[in-house]
Amino acid sequence: MIATALVALVAVIHLAIMAMEMVLWETRPVRALFGISPDFAANTRAMAANQGLYNGFLAAGLLLALWRGLPGPGAELANFILACVIVAGLYGAATASRRILFVQAVPALLALLAVLTGI
């Protein structure tokens, strides 16, 4: 039950990131959240949408794992996708913003530990 809730949380986080990067990138609240100017947002719209698409794929993989069932047949897929999220979060924290560590990597690590232990 805990694993299911944590995997769902990570999926929701990535759906939110997808929406921000693909749809809301140039809005004032998203620009403030990412600390970017209107010009930067306009110039990086396509890049942000591409990143958003990848976040959507991560969310889709986690939702598929949940649909398959945790614990059970979805665990292997959840483990893989969560490991990908952790690596992406670590890389993002090292190269873009330390905040990514806490928004992406830590929740994914907690979810992965929950899936691996079957709680």
Image: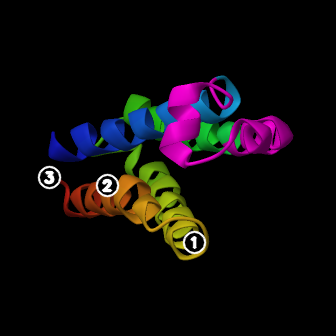
9 sits to left or right of 104: left
Q: Is residue 59 visible?
A: no
Quarter assignment of residue 84: bottom right
Tell me if residue 52 comes above or below residue 22 in the rendering. below
The residue sitting at 34% across, 60% down in the picture is 102
Q: Label 1, label 2: how many angstroms apart (C-alpha)?
A: 15 Å
Q: Tag on residue 102? A: none
Q: Secondary structure at mark 3?
A: loop
The residue type indicated by label 2 comes to Pro
Q: Residues within 10 Å of mark 2 (few under 14, many from 20)?
A: many
Q: Label 3, label 1: how many angstroms apart (C-alpha)?
A: 28 Å
Q: Disc 3 marks which residue?
A: 119
| First reached walking from the N terminus: tag 3 or tag 2 | 2
Foreground disc of the pair 3, 1 = 1
Q: Tag on residue 91? A: 1
The residue sitting at 46% across, 59% down in the picture is 100
Magenta segment boundaries in residue numbering: 24-51
The residue sitting at 51% across, 65% down in the picture is 97
Foreground disc of the pair 3, 2 = 2
Q: Position of residue 103 (x, y in %)?
A: 38, 53
Q: Position of residue 28 (x, y in %)?
A: 57, 27
The residue type indicated by label 3 comes to Ile
Q: Nearer the viewer, residue 41 or 115?
A: 41
The residue type indicated by label 1 comes to Tyr
Q: Disc 2 marks which residue?
A: 107
Q: Residues within 10 Å of mark 1 (few under 14, many from 20)?
A: some
Q: Secondary structure at mark 1?
A: helix
Q: Label 3, label 2: how many angstroms apart (C-alpha)?
A: 15 Å
Decide whether the magenta segment is chiefly helix, strand or loop.
Answer: helix
Is residue 36 shown in magenta?
Answer: yes
The image quadrant where one finds the N terminus is top left
